[in-house]
Image (spheres, helix red, strand yellow):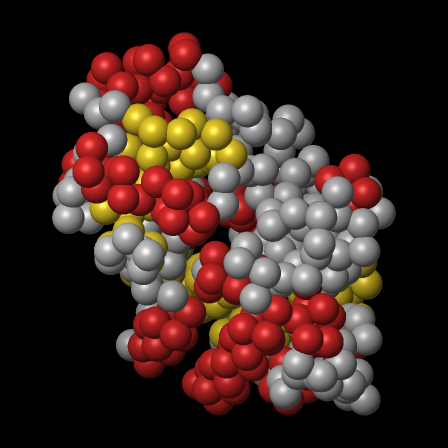
Amino acid sequence: MKRVLLVVFDSVGIGAMPDAADFLDEGANTLVHAAESVGGLAMPVLGSLGLGNLAAVPGVPPAANPLACFGRMQEASPAKDTVTGHWEIAGLISRRPFALYPDGFPPEIMEPFEKESGFATLYNKAASGTVILDQLGEEQMRTGKLIVYTSADSVFQIAAHEEVVPLPELYRACEVARKILDPFRVARVIARPFVGKPGSFARTYNRKDFCMEPPEATLLDRLTAAGIPVTGVGKIEDIFAGRGIAHSVHTEGNDDGFVKTLDLVKQGRQGLVFVNLVDYDMVFGHRRNAPGYARALEAGDAFVGKLLPMLTPEDTLIITADHGCDPSHVAHTDHTREFVPLLVYSSGLAMGHDLGVRKTFADIAATTLKLFGLKPDLAGVPAL
């Protein structure tokens, strides 16, 4: 196989895992609840691949003869965050969850951060990223202090107005935080720049994630060592701290991600093209916008419809997700602990098989290694 396109529909879960109640996620089903919010989805392309064979999705009936292999995957890692999900997709199961700070970060973190970054800070508690701008955006502009906040995920988020704190300075502060937070096992430092005026602040796509390095080898490392190029699209480079990635393509939302992924295929980019489509999670899931989520899913379907005719028999398309973020879940506004879909399409392979329920997301890494003719020596077992 000369090319594998691995596309992560960020947060498109497909039903609560058996331990979902432990994460306050009982009853979650991102895909189905988004579909219900608009009376059914129009997703004929993903439906033809077998998406409707995985769950009772309104508007997406089961395909009599699915064009892809289809299944569901459960997460073996004890978490539901972006980094853990992507690392597991890449063959690294996390046995120990990242650290959480729901009550804010302690002085042993904040004091060196303020000293080394040169910035004073505001807030230092858990918050919604958009609500905190309404509460503190004006004060941030007036004082120049950085808004520091966290969430139910292992994240140290830093918000600042782009006209008050230039992006290079915000990114530098994030790099300072990253070095301080590594021993504390905080998964991500996230730059959250915003623009606008009081009452109409908006976050921008100049967001940048500063992640811990994977503690062990991943699919990306294995492919790079074998001379197979890896291209990351969207926030893939950030999630893997740049490791094992030959090329990185920045995107500004799903629509931009669709266009740039199609362009890479047109250009004949080889190896692994690893794509993250972030808006499902960032714009619609966390904001609990179920109808918006549904329409974004339909746009994703149209994207796949344009992609499929461009693929050769030597190409394999893998579509999945990294966790859930149910837009109608009432308990919280965070990620949800869900199964994720697995669709594998190649006109050069026997298709239409039910892959069942996979025990780990890492089966994608094992499958990809096998497709490239390499030994699947990471976690997981090949699905094909």
Image side of residue 217 versus residue 271, left or right: right
Residue 116 against residue 211 in the figure, above or below: above
Q: Position of residue 139 (x, y in %)?
A: 27, 38
Query: Looking at the image, can residue 120 be seen?
Result: yes
Query: Looking at the image, can residue 242 be seen?
Result: no
Residue 174 against residue 131 in the figure, above or below: above
Residue at 19% x, 34% y is 144
Image side of residue 255 versus residue 204, left or right: right
Residue 91 against residue 357 in the figure, above or below: above
The number of discs equals 0
Residue at 73% x, 70% y is 32
Image side of residue 193 versus residue 34, left or right: left
The front one of 30 and 261 is 30
Q: Quadrant of residue 357?
A: bottom right
Q: Position of residue 347 (x, y in %)?
A: 59, 82
The front one of 122 and 228 is 122
Q: Quadrant of residue 258?
A: bottom left
Residue at 28% x, 33% y is 146
Q: Quadrant of residue 273?
A: bottom left
Identify the image quadrant of the C terminus.
Answer: bottom right
Q: Position of residue 110 (x, y in %)?
A: 36, 18
Q: Position of residue 195 (x, y in %)?
A: 24, 55
